[in-house]
């Protein structure tokens, strides 16, 4: 029984919602750019928050050329970044956002299905979930790498809805970034944004803003019940 919860399923973003990796990646990208001799502004780093891997690699190609380092392909950019990333270790468990376990447990107690739709590669998704004790938490997991374009393109959410067998009107998502919010809205979902005020972007396009993931347990019935 869903009691008074107004949605049959909640689809989670991962970075910024489940784990507070956005700031971690921001700092790591600054170090990576510095080591390559690429001068990037805080605004340019802010613009990468919520972007897909594909979009980031295209931006890296542009940064590399702008720095006078020559022209690289997207595949070369991917190999360059991946080689560096493999030397870095992230304690994902330490970045788990408050209220995630409580929110997922509360949704399941209400009979609400939970899914994950992340722009991150699938191996990274599984590593994060394993570190955070969430390997078996989600009925459906979809990676944006499987699509030509990820968020803000809605395909990742449309595919997740298809795997759930549910219409968009019966579901909501929890996002944090501008691309993620846009993808959810374009897919026809009700969008909850987990509050994020560190990177200078607006979450006003979301239908509601919550401070913690488990806030959705009260906010959804109150606002949309």
Image (spheres, helix red, strand yellow):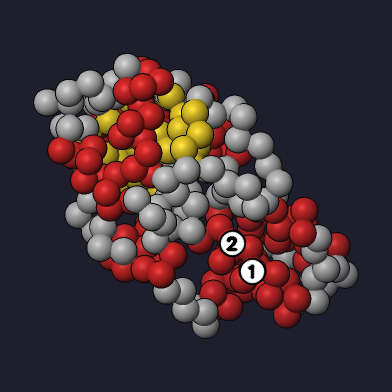
Task: Report if the CB atoms under discs 1 and 2 are less than 8 Å apart.
Answer: yes
Q: Which residue is drawn at 60% across and 35% down?
A: 203
Looking at the rendering, in which quadrant would you find the C terminus?
Answer: top left
Whether residue 222 is visible, yes or no, is yes
Q: Quadrant of the rendered structure where residue 10 is?
A: top left
Which residue is the site of mark 2? 23
Q: Quadrant of the rendered structure where residue 205 is?
A: top right
What kind of element bears circle 2? helix
Q: Where is residue 32 in the image (x, y as percent from the top left)?
A: 67, 74
Q: Where is residue 82 in the image (x, y as percent from the top left)?
A: 54, 72
Q: Position of residue 102 (x, y in %)?
A: 27, 49
Which residue is the site of mark 1? 27
Query: Is 159 displayed left or right of 184 in the figure?
Result: left
Q: Which residue is drawn at 48% across and 58% down?
A: 20
**Picture layout, residue 146 above or below residue 11:** below
Q: Residue at x 18, y 39 (%)?
A: 108
**Picture layout, residue 69 above or below residue 185:** below
Looking at the rendering, in which quadrant would you find the N terminus?
Answer: top left
**Picture layout, residue 154 above or below residue 134:** above
What kind of element bears circle 1? helix
Q: Where is residue 60 in the image (x, y as percent from the top left)?
A: 70, 61
Q: Is 148 or 12 nearer to us in this picture?
A: 12
Whether residue 150 is visible, yes or no, is no
Residues packed near mark 1 inside 10 Å, few (<14), some (14 to 19) or many (20 plus)? few
Q: Is 195 or 124 nearer to us in this picture?
A: 195
Res 135 label: none
Q: Residue at x 28, y 52 (%)?
A: 101
Query: Is 213 displayed left or right of 21 in the figure?
Result: left
């Amino acid at each position: 029984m869903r009691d008074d919860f107004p949605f049959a399923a909640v689809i989670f973003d991962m970075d910024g919602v489940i784990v507070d990796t956005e700031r971690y990646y921001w700092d790591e990208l600054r170090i990576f750019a510095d080591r390559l001799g690429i001068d990037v502004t805080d605004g340019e780093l802010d613009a990468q928050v919520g972007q897909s891997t594909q979009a980031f690699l295209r931006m890296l190609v542009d940064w590399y050329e702008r720095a006078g380092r020559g022209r690289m392909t997207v595949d070369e950019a991917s190999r360059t970044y991946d080689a560096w990333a493999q030397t870095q270790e992230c304690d994902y468990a330490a970045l788990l956002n408050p209220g995630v376990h409580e929110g997922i447990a509360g949704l399941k107690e209400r009979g609400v299905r939970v899914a994950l739709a992340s722009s991150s590669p699938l191996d990274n998704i599984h590593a994060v979930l394993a570190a955070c004790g969430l390997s078996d938490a989600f009925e459906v997991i979809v990676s944006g790498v499987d699509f030509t374009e990820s968020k803000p393109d809605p395909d990742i959410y449309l595919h997740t809805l298809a795997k759930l067998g549910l219409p968009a009107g019966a579901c909501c998502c929890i996002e944090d970034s501008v691309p993620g919010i846009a993808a959810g809205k374009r897919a026809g979902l009700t969008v909850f944004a987990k509050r994020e005020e560190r990177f200078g972007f607006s979450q006003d396009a979301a239908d509601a803003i919550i401070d913690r993931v488990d806030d959705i347990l009260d906010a959804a019935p109150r606002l949309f019940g």
